[in-house]
Amino acid sequence: MPLEIQIQKNVAAGDAGAATVKLTGSLDTATAPELERQLAPVLAGPGKDIVFDLAQLKFISSAGLRVFANTRKALKERGGQASFINMQPQIQEVFEIIKALPGIRVFKDLAELDRYLAARQHSYEENR
C-alpha cells in the first residue's frame, strides 16, 4: 500500500510554528525513505515541533518507527518535540508493544494536544 504525505506548516506571527504531517496508507520499508526525504526540509527549517496526524495511517513497520525516532531526536536536540495524534488502534498497539519511542507524547486528537500545550505554556508563565 502506498503512503500519501501531506505537510502543512502552521506559522504563527513571529514564531516558526509547528508543522503537521498527515500520513495516509502504509509506512514501511518501501515508503519510509520518501517520508524522510519530505521531512528533510522541515527539519532543516526553524520549526521546533512536528505533529504527526496518523488518522489515516493503516500500517507501520520498524522502518517507519525509525523515521519517527530520528525525527524526534533531531527536534529534541533543538528544544522541540514530535507529537502524534489520531492514532489508529493497530498503530497504537505497535507503539505500546515495542515502546520504541520512550518519552514521546501521544494524543487522542488535536484538541487534546492543544489542551496539553496550553497547560504547558500556562505553567511556564506561572513559574517565571
Image (spheres, rainbow, N blue to C red):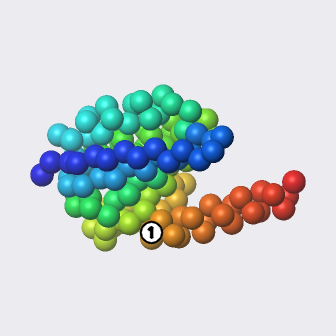
Q: Secondary structure at mark 1?
A: loop
Question: Toward which corner of the image does residue 54 lie, by quadrant?
Answer: bottom left
Question: Toward which corner of the image does residue 55 lie, by quadrant?
Answer: bottom left
Position of residue 50 measured from the top left corner of the image (x, y, whole percent): 48, 47
Residue at the left extreme of this rendering: 1
Residue at the right extreme of this rendering: 128
Q: Which image quarter is the C terminus in?
A: bottom right
Asked whether, in this view, residue 104 is left or right of residue 2, the answer is right
Above or below, 13 relative to 125: above
Q: Residue at x 77, y 62 (%)?
A: 123
Q: How many marks?
A: 1
Q: Is residue 62 visible?
A: no
Label 1 is placed on what type of residue? Answer: Asp
**Residue bearing mark 1:** 109
Q: Residue at x 63, y 45 (%)?
A: 13
Above or below, 60 relative to 55: above
Q: Residue at x 85, y 58 (%)?
A: 127
Position of residue 39 measured from the top left corner of the image (x, y, whole percent): 38, 36
Asked whether, in this view, residue 29 is left or right of residue 13, the answer is left
Position of residue 111 measured from the top left corner of the image (x, y, whole percent): 51, 70
Q: Is residue 74 visible?
A: yes
Q: Residue at x 46, y 52 (%)?
A: 51
